[in-house]
Image (cartoon, helix red, strand yellow):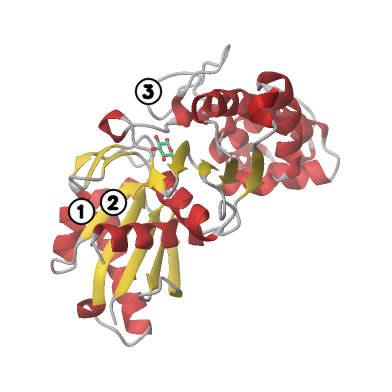
């Protein structure tokens, strides 16, 4: 029986899964990406994660049909090249060949991480049963992807969907992509933590200042803001309100352009749930025409880590023609 591997490379963690021919997940491993160590380190790590998964099921590389991999960044899926990645700092890296070489020639198909996540959520998760599925992730970075009738939308140069790099009025923070004031600098998990830190530095009162005194402030994550919110913390509430309102601005553009039936929001910062989505929905009302709004459902992702893994494996199976 042929097996498939799905890999989801995040700015922070890599999740790697082994799937059987019916794309049922047999096992999964998760490790820190360690992107600062460079592309070869990351690809060696992925090859070792794949071997670990295979060994765990008593299988070998000969049992693999293909490997699929979602990458954070601009990807050329036809040539298997990572063109540019704001968060991994990879430029024109022939990822498919490099990983395929490490695996003894097994075909490796790569695409953008959010496309693979959307592919997974559309097939098995919150997008199931909808014709026009838009996926968005709020993780280390932000992007969107669109699937119409099962077909991913790529745009010219495979560049469609980079919602994280659209500008927000009045925002000036430097984004990993080199532009300033991008939605990603505000509504990503890293953006949320940054905004809270900057407000603490300005001396605004918050329980976060007690939890993270002095230098420890740099360790604040988006999850800590939610924790503070639940204690009734005004700064945390204000930050998530601000982020939710700005997220609505980004989504309003995407809704007008793509008219999805469903938007599936995932990624680490989506764990804030209604703390973030309530202000986002409120802000979205006056920004989107009822014609779109009335037919649109906004849901949170259902598959967590599995969406990117299952989506990548399904994509690889389809590309391998199996
Ligand atoms: C990148 C996208 C990626 C997203 C999520 C953004 O910074 O430009 O390509 O999909 O982060 O990882």
* Residue pointed to by mark 3: 178
In the image, residue 163 lies at what x, y percent? 47, 30
Residue 58: quadrant of the picture: bottom left
Residue 41: quadrant of the picture: bottom left
- At a point 56% along the width and 51% down the height, the residue shown is 127
N-term mark: 3 or 1: 1
In the image, residue 70 lies at what x, y percent? 36, 51
Name the disc covering residue 255, or none.
none
300 left or right of 321?
right
In this view, the residue in front, 209 or 96, is 96
State which quarter of the image contains the N terminus: bottom left
In the image, residue 282 lies at what x, y percent? 76, 28
The reply to whether discs 3 and 1 touch (Cβ–Cβ < 8 Å) is no
**Ligand 1 sits in quadrant:** top left
Name the disc covering residue 96, or none.
1
Q: Give above or below for 215 relative to 54.
A: above
N-term mark: 2 or 1: 1
Q: How many neighbours does mark 2 have within 10 angstroms: few (below 14), some (14-19), or many (20 or more)?
A: many
* Residue pointed to by mark 2: 110
For the residues carrying marks 2 and 3, which lies nearer the camera in this image?
A: 2
At mark 1, the secondary structure is: helix
- At a point 13% along the width and 66% down the height, the residue shown is 105
For the residues carrying marks 3 and 1, which lies nearer the camera in this image?
A: 1
In this view, the residue in front, 314 or 182, is 314
């Amino acid at each position: 029986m042929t097996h498939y591997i799905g890999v989801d490379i995040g700015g922070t963690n890599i999740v790697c899964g082994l799937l059987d021919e019916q794309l049922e997940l047999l096992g999964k491993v998760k490790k820190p990406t360690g992107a600062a160590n460079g592309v070869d380190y990351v690809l060696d790590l992925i090859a070792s994660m794949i071997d670990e998964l295979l060994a765990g099921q008593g299988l070998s590389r000969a049992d693999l049909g293909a490997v699929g991999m979602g990458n954070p960044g601009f990807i050329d899926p036809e040539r298997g090249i990572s063109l540019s990645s704001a968060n991994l700092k990879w430029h024109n890296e022939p990822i498919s060949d490099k990983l395929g070489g490490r695996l003894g020639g097994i075909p490796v198909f790569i695409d953008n991480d959010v496309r693979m996540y959307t592919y997974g959520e559309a097939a098995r998760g919150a997008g199931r049963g909808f014709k026009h599925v838009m996926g968005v992730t709020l993780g280390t970075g932000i992007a969107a992807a669109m699937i119409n009738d099962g077909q991913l939308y790529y745009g010219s140069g495979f560049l469609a969907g980079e919602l994280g790099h659209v500008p927000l009025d009045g925002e000036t923070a430097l984004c990993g992509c080199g532009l300033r004031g991008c939605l990603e600098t505000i509504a990503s998990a890293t953006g949320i933590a940054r905004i809270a830190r900057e407000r603490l530095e300005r001396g605004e009162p918050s329980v976060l200042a007690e939890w993270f005194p002095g230098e420890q402030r740099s360790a604040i994550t988006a999850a800590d803001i939610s924790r503070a919110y639940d204690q009734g913390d005004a700064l945390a509430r204000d930050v998530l309100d601000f982020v939710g309102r700005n997220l609505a601005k980004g989504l309003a553009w995407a809704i007008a352009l793509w008219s999805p039936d469903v938007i599936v929001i995932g990624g680490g910062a989506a764990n804030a749930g209604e703390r973030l989505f309530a202000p986002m929905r409120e802000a979205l009302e006056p920004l989107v025409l009822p014609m779109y709004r009335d037919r649109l459902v906004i849901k949170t992702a259902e598959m967590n880590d599995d969406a990117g893994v299952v989506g990548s494996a399904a994509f690889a199976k389809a590309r391998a023609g199996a």
